[in-house]
Amino acid sequence: MNQLIIMSIIIFIIMMILIILSMIISKKMYYDREKNSSFECGFNPNSHARIPFSMHFFIISILFLIFDIEITILLPFFLTLKICNLLNYMMIFYLFMLILILSIFHEWNQNVLKWKI
C-alpha cells in the first residue's frame, strides 16, 4: 500500500514538472483574441446566429455523408463473401448497387450535383 502511495506521488510530481516545462518551452508567448476564439464552419461565434446559409452546401454535405456511410456498408460485403451463399450475396449486392446508382442519377437529374459559384 505504501508503494502505491509513493508511486502516485512520484507520478504526480513528474506530471507537474512536464506541464510546467511545456508551458515554459511553448512557442506561443502571447495570447491573441482571434487565435483563442472558437472557429466553427467559417462563422464568427459572436455574430448573429441567423445569417444566410448556403442550402446547396448543406445538400452536398448530406449527400457526402450518405454515400460515405454506404461505402462503409459495402466494405463488409467483401469480407463475408466466403461464408455466404453466392446467389443471395450477389442479389443483395446488385440490389444495393442499383439503389446507389439510381440515387446518383436522381440527384444528377435534380441538379443537386451542379456546383454554382
Image (cartoon, rainbow, N blue to C red):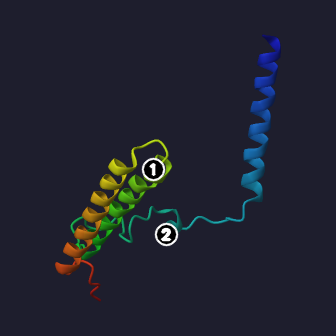
Residue 62 rendering spot, x and y as whole percentages: 29, 64
Number of the label disc, if any, that sits on residue 98? none
Q: Residue at x 30, y 72 (%)?
A: 60
Q: Which of 8 and 79 is in front in this view?
A: 79
Residue 53 rendering spot, x and y as whole percentages: 24, 72
Q: Which residue is drawn at 35% across and 70% down?
A: 43
Instruction: Report the mark closest to the observer, 2 or 1.
Output: 1
Q: Which of marks 2 and 1 is nearer the N terminus?
A: 2
Looking at the picture, does residue 31 appear above or below residue 111? above
Q: Which residue is drawn at 19% across and 73% down?
A: 106
Within 10 Å of disc 2 (Cα), the crowding (few <14, some 14-19, many 20+) is: few
Compute the Cα span from label 2 to label 1: 44 Å
Looking at the picture, does residue 117 appear above or below residue 82? below
Residue at the spot of label 1? 76
**Amino acid at circle 2:** Glu
The residue tagged with tag 2: helix, strand or loop?
A: helix
Residue 56 rendering spot, x and y as whole percentages: 24, 76
**Amino acid at circle 1:** Pro
Number of the label disc, if any, that sits on residue 34? 2
| Rendered-image quadrant of the N terminus | top right
Left or right placement of residue 51 versus residue 1 in this view: left
Q: In which quarter of the image is residue 32?
A: bottom right
The residue tagged with tag 1: helix, strand or loop?
A: helix
Looking at the picture, does residue 64 appear above or below residue 56? above
Is the residue under label 1 in contact with that under label 2 (CB below 8 Å)? Answer: no
Marker count (numbered): 2
Q: Which residue is drawn at 25% across and 62% down?
A: 99
Within 10 Å of disc 1 (Cα), the crowding (few <14, some 14-19, many 20+) is: few
Q: Which residue lies furthest to the bottom in this view?
A: 117
